[in-house]
Image (cartoon, rainbow, N blue to C red):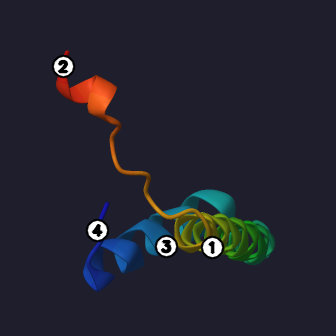
């Protein structure tokens, strides 16, 4: 999903009106913390996958597979 800046501002303005100023600040802070943790986890998994790809070279197919 790719959101433009104007779409994000519109969503933020609607959330501000619906939640009110106190809850908006609290909820947006919690959302920011959650997104930060999610990005960190995703990056950790990405690094692990890249390390696995480097650590395990691809195995060429055996001759038995050619006869199938």
Mark closer to the chain start, 4 or 2: 4
Residue 57: horizontal and vertical position, in percent? Answer: 49, 64
Instruction: Indicate left or right for 35 with 23 as reference.
Output: left
**Dot 3: within a 10 Å radius of its alpha carbon, few (fewer than 14), some, or many (20 or more) residues?**
some
SS type, badge 4: loop
**Dot 4: within a 10 Å radius of its alpha carbon, few (fewer than 14), some, or many (20 or more) residues?**
few
Q: Which residue is mark 2?
A: 67
SS type, badge 3: helix
> Comparing marks 2 and 3, which lies closer to the viewer?
2
Q: Residue 51 has which mark?
A: 1
Name which residue lies at 43% across and 57% down.
58
Q: Which residue is mark 3?
A: 12
Q: Which residue is mark 4?
A: 2
Structural distance between the alpha carbons of marks 4 and 1:
28 Å
Residue 65: horizontal and vertical position, in percent? Answer: 28, 26
Name which residue lies at 77% across and 74% down.
33
Mark closer to the chain start, 3 or 4: 4
Structural distance between the alpha carbons of marks 1 and 2:
33 Å
Structural distance between the alpha carbons of marks 3 and 4:
16 Å
**Quadrant of the image occupied by residue 17:** bottom right
Name which residue lies at 35% across and 50% down.
60
Mark closer to the chain start, 1 or 3: 3
């Amino acid at each position: 999903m790719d959101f433009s800046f104007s779409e994000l501002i519109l969503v933020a303005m609607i959330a501000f009106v619906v939640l009110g100023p106190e809850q908006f600040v609290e909820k947006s802070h919690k959302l920011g913390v959650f997104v930060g943790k999610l990005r960190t986890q995703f990056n950790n998994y990405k690094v692990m996958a890249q390390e696995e790809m480097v650590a395990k070279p691809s195995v060429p197919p055996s001759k038995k597979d050619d006869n199938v």
